[in-house]
Image (cartoon, rainbow, N blue to C red):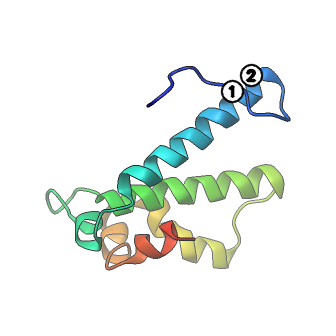
Amino acid sequence: MFNAKFESQDGYDKGIGELVYMLQHTRMMTEFEVAELTDKQLDYLLDPTSNSIGMLLQHIASIEFLHQVMSFEERMMNEEEEKEWMAAMQLGERGREEIKNGTVTIICKN
């Protein structure tokens, strides 16, 4: 059963610990909710200009990666990293072309 009371993650100040707990909880619940989706479901587009569930998951991962690089390495993405993540960051037509056919399944399992 879901407990709506957020705890504080050990090893952090109370406020930061609660934020870490919430982020970890959100990640866990997202992974749980999409775990059984097929590639076809992850790739489904409601209309020709929409984003699929897989695209949105990849977008979340790309933003997380960018923030990690900026925060912990104090830099922007390099050319190789941009090549890997830019479709997910931009979404749109490029995302629809590049993020499909199991791309997300591979990333979710890593």
Looking at the picture, which amino acid does disc 2 mark?
Gly
**Three-letter amino acid code at disc 1?**
Glu
In the displayed structure, does residue 2 sit left or right of residue 98? right
Question: Nearest the camera: 2 or 26?
Answer: 2
What whole-number distance in Å separates the C-alpha atoms at marks 1 and 2?
A: 5 Å
The residue labelled by disc 2 is 15
Residue 83: image quadrant is: bottom right
| Left or right, residue 72 beside residue 1 | right
Horizontal and vertical percent for residue 27?
Answer: 53, 47
In this picture, residue 84 sits left or right of residue 101:
right
Residue 99 spot, x, y in % from top left? 37, 72
Quadrant in which the N terminus is drawn = top left
What residue lies at 55% left-to-right and 60% top-to-bottom?
62
- Does residue 35 sit above or below 28 in this rendering? below
In the image, residue 25 lies at what x, y percent?
Answer: 56, 39
Residue at screen point 82% across, 53% down: 72
In which quadrant will I find the C terminus? bottom right
Q: Quarter-wise, where is residue 52 in the image?
A: bottom left
Callout 1–callout 2 Cβ contact below 8 Å: yes
Q: Identify the residue position indicated by label 1 in the image.
A: 18
Residue lying at 57% horizontally and 53% vertically, measured from the top left: 63
Label 2 element class: helix
Q: Secondary structure at mark 1?
A: helix
